[in-house]
Amino acid sequence: MPTLILLRHGQSTWNLENLFTGWEDVDLTEKGKAEAVRGGELLLEHDCLPTVLHTSLQKRAIRTAELALPACDRSWIPVRRSWRLNERHYGALQGKDKKATTAQYGADQVKIWRRSFDVRPPDLEWDASADPKYAGLPLDVIPKAECLADVIARMLPYWYDGIVPDLVAGHVTLVAAHGNSLRALAMHLEGLTPDEVLELNIPTGQPRVYELDDRMRLQSWRYLDPAGAAAAADAVSGQAG
């Protein structure tokens, strides 16, 4: 039975500072590093050991995996990375303080940008070619801002072409990524509605384990530490990327 493990990166420096992060490439805090290690320890304790890793191109997801894998003695597994697993692009909100943004635009408008399924924040004009991670991508796939529906649309091709082949091959597949890219994948796997997925808060550092059938249909899912996951989900409910 194919096994898929989702692991949201630990607390980032901009999470701590209450800033919109998105595609900005920030690192983990000390708390975030500890969360990542604990995620790996849970994998070891429950004998849920990955044999292949997928991450985004962003430092906080990569660093999370680099800390989690030694904790479960799996540093040696093959690694695949894709921009399609990146966090949602928050457009012109990136780098802005969330409280200051609320004061500027009003709580109702900020809530729409943060929690609606299909409304994007204002665009950010940026030169993707200046960042070597994205320099080889066609300009028409580089977002200037995204809603969750956009994240789903750009993530699903990687699910089918990148992750599913590893599951079919029998790999226990770990995906270390971000709140919104993992929500997008959870929506697809669990058949969530747009309203349901908007209420889903995936906790940091808590492995979310899916058992699938041979046609990649969901059989069951669980957290390895349900109580810890519930507490962590409450803690991240107000975060944005």
Image (cartoon, rainbow, N blue to C red):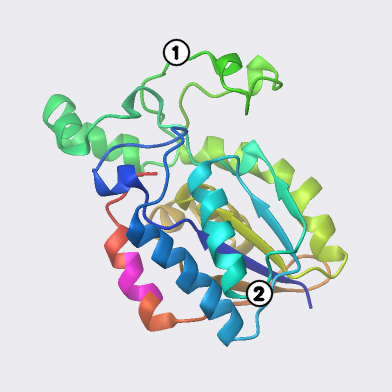
Disc 2, SS: loop
Q: Amino acid at mark 1?
A: Glu
- Frontmost residue, 71 versus 52: 71
Of labels 1 and 2, the one closer to you: 2
**On screen, residue 131 above or below 33:** above
User: Could you say which quadrant of the image residue 104 lies in?
Assistant: top left
Q: Which residue is mark 2?
A: 73
Mark 1–mark 2 distance (CA, rounded to whole Å) = 42 Å
The picture places residue 131, in percent across and down from the top left corner, at 57, 22
Around disc 2, counting alpha carbons within 10 Å, would you say few (fewer than 14), some (14 to 19), or many (20 or more)? some
**On screen, residue 143 above or below 183:** above
Q: Which residue, as the protein is rendered here, is positioned at the far left?
A: 103
Q: Which residue is mark 1?
A: 125
Q: Is residue 184 left or right of residue 80?
A: left
Q: Is residue 111 left or right of residue 224?
A: left
**On screen, residue 167 above or below 221:** above
Q: Is residue 68 left or right of residue 226?
A: right
The picture places residue 47, in percent across and down from the top left corner, at 65, 85
**Residue 217 got which mark?**
none
The picture places residue 168, in percent across and down from the top left corner, at 85, 64
Q: Main secondary structure of the magenta part?
A: helix
1 or 2: tag closer to the N-terminus: 2
Q: Which residues are magenta?
A: 229-233
**On screen, residue 49 above or below 32:** below
